[in-house]
Image (spheres, rainbow, N blue to C red):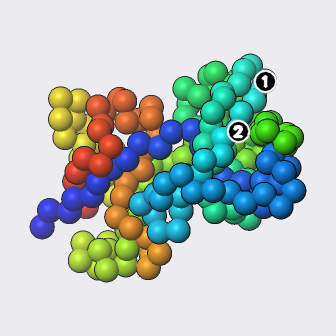
Amino acid sequence: MKRFVPIARSDIHVHLQRDHVEALFGRGYRLTNLRDLTIPGQFCCNEQVTVVGPAGSIEGVYVVGPPRSQTQVEISFTNGLTLGIAPPLRYSGDLDHTPGCTLIGPAGSVTLSQGVIAARRHIHMHTSEAQAYGITDGQLVKVLIPGDRALIFNDVKVLVGDNQALEMHVDFDEGHAAGIEDFQEVEILL
């Protein structure tokens, strides 16, 4: 049985907690939807911030909504060179003992003591798709990326749930290395 999944490259972005939304954009501010993302309920916002590190800054970084319980800044290792931050490779939400940065918005700034990560590659999968593929939540799989720069990604964690939709995520560094085009089909190898 062949197990295919669309893949998408994830650029630098920020997830904000509610009080940081207000600190950056103004009291009572609500994030606005630019476009829905594949994962149900998540959206790319119209709002953008500047991410500042010890060595430099990156402007025009999109916020991803809705607000979360903790602010998280997801960067690639290349972004880290620009910012002067060595991000640890982590899964979303695993923020203990991570570096911080400063975020600047139109209404103010927030300095984070932690929250900057390079996201580990992973696959989102609805429960019904996982059952059809014979895959369980948290399982590590290999994924074959076809093409002129074909390669196999090892240790890809599968996140299974009724609030998920089928899509693999890698950052731009990994995407460029493999010549990935967003939403192309890749194959899960068990």
Q: Residue at x 29, y 54 (%)?
A: 6
Residue 117 visible in the shown view: no
Residue 17, which numbered label?
none
Give whichever of 166, 85 is nearer the camera.
Answer: 166
In the displayed structure, would residue 73 be above or below residue 69?
Answer: above
Q: CA distance from mark 2 to mark 1?
A: 17 Å
In the displayed structure, would residue 121 be above or below residue 104?
Answer: below
Q: Secondary structure beneath disc 1?
A: loop
What percent of the width, then of the height, locates residue 131? Answer: 29, 79
Give whichever of 79, 136 is nearer the camera.
Answer: 79
- For the C terminus, the image quarter is bottom left
Q: Residue at x 66, y 29 (%)?
A: 59
Which residue matches tag 2?
A: 49
Give whichever of 38, 162 is nearer the camera.
Answer: 38
Give whichever of 37, 122 is nearer the camera.
Answer: 37
Which residue matches tag 1?
A: 54
Q: Which amino acid lies under the numbered mark 1 shown in the image of this protein?
A: Pro
**Residue furthest out toward the left:** 1
Q: Which amino acid lies under the numbered mark 2 shown in the image of this protein?
A: Val
What percent of the width, then of the height, locates residue 15? Answer: 66, 53
Q: Residue at x 78, y 57 (%)?
A: 29
Between marks 2 and 1 in the image, the one whose residue lies nearer the viewer: 2
In the displayed structure, would residue 173 be above or below residue 22?
Answer: above
